Amino acid sequence: MEKKTARLEAFSDGIFSVAITLLAIEIGISEYEGATNLDLWHKILAKWPAYFTYFNSFATVLLIWIGHHKIINQVRAASQGVLLLNGMVLLFVVLFPFPTKTVGAFIGTNAVNTAVAFYAGYTGLIVLSMLLLNVGIVRKTKLLVSAENSLPWFRKMIKGQVIGVMVYGVATLIAFYSPAVALLLTFAMWVFWAVVTFDTEEELL
């Protein structure tokens, strides 16, 4: 059967592109009086929390996009429910720069616990939205190009996403006691997503 997801893919890819662009747009150092070479180097190095969170968030969004691409590759057509669930994924993704900027700005301050908890919890919401999208697709197998080939892959992804939601939930709680450990958990998770996303025979088109 003919695939009818071209507009869905184009719109989704556009949103992912905007999200990734917005992640980096706030990184920079404004011009200031009395600048010297040494002082500027100090300011560049002092921005390390922004660099770390940008890299962490970029890797997360990239892997979510790859997973999303694989999902849509296996969908023949999208129902109204799937369109709405996909929209929820995009809503959370395009707002991801907000918690990313927040945690980058408040590392090293007395508000670091809240900032990291917000970041970890928000990342968990993105994963939860992807989980709901997969569940919505699996419930209507007629939407799939090949249910026989795709269902085992979707079940594996759903299992990984359930684990992901739980880990991000734990990281959110840990952030109130040890924000550094919570941040390391979010860093380790995109490594986990890389394994889950690429450990499949389904090929990118």
Image (cartoon, helix red, strand yellow):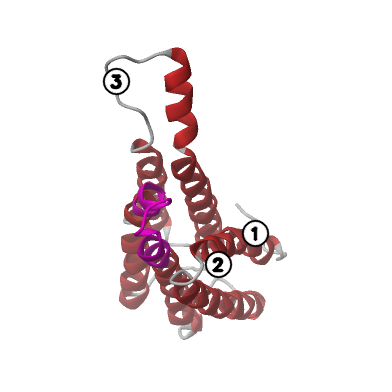
Look at 52% across and 66% down and name the residue there.
182
Cα distance in 3D space between marks 3 and 2:
49 Å
The reply to whether the C-beta atoms of the residues labelled 1 and 2 are less than 8 Å apart is no
Q: In the picture, residue 153 is in which quadrant?
A: bottom right
Cα distance in 3D space between marks 1 and 2:
24 Å
Q: Which residue ends up furthest to the left in the rendered image?
A: 33
Which is more toward the observer, 159 or 151?
159
Q: Which callout, 1 or 3, points at the residue further toward the start of the chain?
A: 3
Whether residue 94 appears in magenta in the rendering, the answer is no
Residue 2 seen: no
The reply to whether the C-beta atoms of the residues labelled 1 and 3 are less than 8 Å apart is no
Q: Which residue ends up furthest to the bottom in the rendered image?
A: 139
The magenta-colored residue range is 102-119
Q: Which callout, 3 or 2, points at the residue further toward the start of the chain?
A: 3
Q: Amino acid at mark 2?
A: Gln
Q: Which mark is residue 191?
A: 1
The reply to whether the C-beta atoms of the residues labelled 3 and 2 are less than 8 Å apart is no
Which is more toward the observer, 147 or 93?
93
The residue labelled by disc 2 is: 74
The residue labelled by disc 3 is: 31
Residue 21 seen: yes
> Is the residue marked by circle 2 packed among few (<14), some (14-19), or many (20+) residues within 10 Å?
many
Q: Which callout, 1 or 2, points at the residue further toward the start of the chain?
A: 2
